């Protein structure tokens, strides 16, 4: 019974996302949603897939990757091109979509191996630079292709799908991504990946095949980035390689960091929030006010980070902690303390002076002296 | 040759001009508790690192149950049956206590479960997962950590962290367990408790133990045989009492 509840807990976020997806599908079929709303939903879904897949590498494997948009770019272009080729015979069917997503994802996964191999030797900042370089290289390769092959600077045109249909597929892909990542992380393989993050030396000594699991994390992460890229290419009809610069990689990283490194639910929320804010700003702030877009975005990020970490706000956070409110709601026993939550700031560390002076040290001194003479004697 | 669980032959390693260990010959019989002692910098941990594949010996070789393991990777050596703990505790800090042990269990052939089985949640996944959890709980009970199984391992007190590290090493089903200063930083009660635990696991899991320790009471109370190292060379070897009373050993430790 308890095991059942526990395993269900991992899927709460997936269930909520699925319910939300179902709701929007029903809405679009009955009342009909505006084109802009559907486009926003697609953008959010793509962002969530990207954030969750990047979280696999950054949050669970503990390696900093700044080239996630590069994997997405590879997926978008190759998946998109594949769709253009096969749509002449298969038409704009679901099969075209699925096949091109598989192709885009697989090619991106192969690039994941390419990046994963140096990752076995590189660490931290150095790996970040390699991945950053990878993203930029991929971007410029596709920028400099000919008009016939990948569209070059003008971009690649992809088959036009019915928007109402496409976002249903997008939600389905998102749910599959969430299930795969959750299932992976809550299995022995996921534990092995997190053990590498926590202590690579100990993981090796415990018999974990570090090479295998690092590559596994990179491959799965880049596969889903590639799939998200294909979705992106269908959602926009036209892909421009300039979109996949390091700015976009960092935006995905911001989603992961903001949502909490290693938290899938956090990634979902943060990706939704950031995409929503960005899109809203882009529609509201037009003309001269467009310069404010990035400024407001940055201010919001700063406020969230300060709220999450500032010690001055800790009392406020405690009071309005969502978890605690839930506990109250569920009437959990507060005496069960799972973690060390003592407020170490309030514990006095200074020893009063008179207490220090009252300690009699003369006796100990004598002992020390006699010890030393003994040793000398020997 | 196969009579010994571990046999090292002229094992040595040099770092540039520094001879960290040379000509170390250790023979450990089955179910022995063997001690490795010596002053700081004598090369004890270096030997552990060679035996677990962190360093490749520059001279000599070593055998586990007659099988040469020199030059093998850390993972392979662990699969072959050498597990270790570390001098400075290296737990998976952000994982719960039981997960630490589960990581150790994941390489055993009986708990084999492929990536796709796990991702698609096939029945085999649930079976192995349940079996692994049962085994982990059993191990935690031996080390008196069962109650804390869902706590984060970094929140455990020091003595229990040491025990958890041993439990994790045991989870990999070793034939030879290397303990690097298991009693460091423990109070006398915890040390006595640990001595009993080490004897218990030796008997229960039918393993051989090689340990590094500075606490002479601990060593003389627990070890059947010891090797004393100084500056990378063997100073004395054999029966614990005789070796510890060797004038050379006393000289190396106390000076004179």
Image (tube, rainbow, N blue to C red):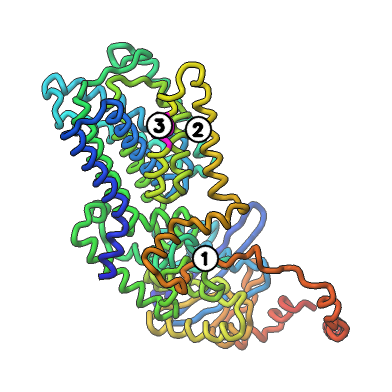
**Total tally of numbered discs in the picture:** 3
Which chain is mark 1 on?
B
- Relative depth, front residue between A366 and B78: A366
- Dot 3 and dot 1 within a common chain: no
Q: Quadrant of residue A90?
A: top left
**Secondary structure category for the residue under label 1:** helix
What is the spatial separation of the Cα atoms under label 3 and label 2, in whole angstroms?
20 Å
The disc label shown at residue B154, or none: 1
| Residue located 49% across and 56% down the image | A320
The quadrant of the image that shows the N terminus of chain B is bottom left
Of badges 3 and 2, the one in the foreground is 2
**Secondary structure category for the residue under label 2:** helix
Q: Earlier in the sequence, mark 3 or mark 2?
A: 3
Instruction: Count residues near mark 3 (Cα–Cα under 10 Å), then give few for <14, some for 14-19, many for 20+.
Output: many
Q: Which residue is mark 2?
A: A297
Q: Which residues are magenta?
A: A274-280
The disc label shown at residue B254, or none: none
What is the spatial separation of the Cα atoms under label 2 and label 1, in whole angstroms?
36 Å
Task: Tell me residue A354's x, y (percent).
Answer: 84, 76
| Residue located 50% across and 39% down the image | A127
Instruction: Count residues near mark 1 (Cα–Cα under 10 Å), then give few for <14, some for 14-19, many for 20+.
Output: some
| Residue located 44% across and 56% down the image | A322
Tell me if I can see residue B4 in this picture: no
- Dot 3 and dot 2 within a common chain: yes
Q: Which residue is mark 3?
A: A69
Residue A308 forms part of the magenta stretch: no
| Residue located 55% across and 47% down the image | A307
Q: Is residue A172 above or below residue B169?
A: above
Residue A278 forms part of the magenta stretch: yes
Q: Is residue A200 above or below residue B219?
A: above
């Amino acid at each position: 019974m308890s095991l059942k509840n526990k395993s269900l807990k991992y899927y709460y976020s997936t269930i909520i996302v699925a319910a939300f997806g179902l709701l929007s599908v029903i809405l679009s079929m009955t009342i009909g949603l505006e084109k802009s709303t559907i486009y926003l939903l697609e953008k959010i879904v793509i962002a969530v897939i990207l954030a969750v897949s990047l979280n696999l590498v950054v949050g669970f494997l503990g390696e900093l990757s700044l080239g996630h948009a590069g994997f997405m770019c590879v997926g978008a272009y190759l998946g998109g091109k594949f769709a253009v080729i096969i749509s002449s015979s298969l038409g704009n069917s679901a099969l075209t979509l699925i096949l091109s997503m598989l192709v885009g994802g697989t090619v991106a996964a192969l690039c994941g191996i390419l990046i994963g191999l140096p990752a076995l030797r590189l660490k931290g900042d150095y790996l970040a630079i390699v991945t950053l370089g990878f993203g930029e290289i991929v971007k410029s390769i596709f920028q400099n292709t000919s008009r016939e092959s990948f569209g070059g600077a003008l971009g690649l045109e992809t088959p036009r799908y019915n928007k109402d249909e496409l976002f249903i597929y997008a939600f389905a892909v998102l749910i599959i991504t969430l299930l795969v990542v959750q299932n992976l992380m809550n299995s022995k393989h996921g534990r092995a990946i997190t053990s590498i993050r926590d202590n690579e030396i100990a993981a090796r000594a415990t018999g974990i095949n570090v090479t295998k699991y690092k590559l596994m994390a990179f491959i799965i992460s880049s596969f889903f980035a590639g799939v998200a890229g294909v979705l992106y290419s269908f959602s926009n009809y036209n892909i421009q390689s300039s979109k996949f610069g390091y700015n976009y990689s960092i935006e995905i990283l911001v989603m992961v960091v903001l949502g909490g490194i290693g938290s899938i639910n956090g990634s979902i929320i943060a990706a939704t929030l950031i995409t929503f804010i960005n899109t809203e700003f882009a529609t509201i702030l037009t003309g001269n006010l467009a310069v404010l877009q990035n400024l407001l975005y940055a201010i919001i990020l700063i406020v969230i980070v300060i709220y999450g970490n500032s010690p001055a706000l800790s009392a406020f956070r405690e009071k309005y902690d969502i978890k605690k409110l839930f506990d109250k709601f569920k009437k959990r026993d507060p005496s069960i303390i799972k973690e060390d939550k003592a407020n170490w700031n309030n514990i006095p560390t200074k020893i009063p002076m008179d207490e220090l002076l009252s300690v009699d040290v003369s006796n100990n001194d004598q002992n020390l002296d006699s010890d030393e003479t003994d040793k000398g004697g020997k | 040759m196969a009579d010994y669980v571990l046999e090292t032959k002229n094992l040595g390693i040099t770092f540039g001009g520094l001879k960290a260990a040379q000509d170390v010959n250790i023979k450990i019989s089955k179910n022995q508790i063997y001690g490795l002692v010596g002053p700081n910098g004598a090369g004890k941990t270096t030997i552990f690192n060679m035996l677990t594949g962190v360093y490749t010996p520059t001279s000599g070789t070593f055998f586990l149950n007659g099988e040469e393991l020199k030059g093998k990777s850390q993972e392979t050596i662990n699969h072959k049956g050498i597990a270790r703990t570390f001098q400075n505790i290296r737990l998976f800090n952000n994982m719960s206590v039981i997960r630490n042990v589960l990581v150790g269990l994941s390489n055993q052939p009986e708990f084999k479960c492929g990536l796709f089985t796990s991702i698609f949640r096939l029945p085999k996944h649930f079976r192995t997962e349940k079996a692994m959890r049962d085994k982990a709980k059993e191990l935690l009970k031996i080390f008196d950590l069962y109650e804390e199984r869902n706590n984060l391992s970094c929140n455990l007190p020091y003595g229990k962290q040491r025990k958890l590290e041993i439990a994790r090493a045991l989870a990999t089903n070793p034939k030879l367990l290397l303990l690097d200063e298991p009693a460091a930083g423990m109070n006398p009660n915890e040390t006595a408790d640990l001595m009993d635990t080490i004897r218990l696991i030796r008997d229960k899991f039918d393993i051989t133990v090689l340990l590094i320790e500075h606490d002479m009471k601990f060593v003389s109370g627990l070890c059947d045989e010891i090797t004393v190292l100084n500056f990378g060379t063997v100073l004395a070897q054999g029966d614990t009492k005789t070796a510890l009373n060797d004038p050379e050993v006393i000289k190396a430790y106390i000076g004179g």
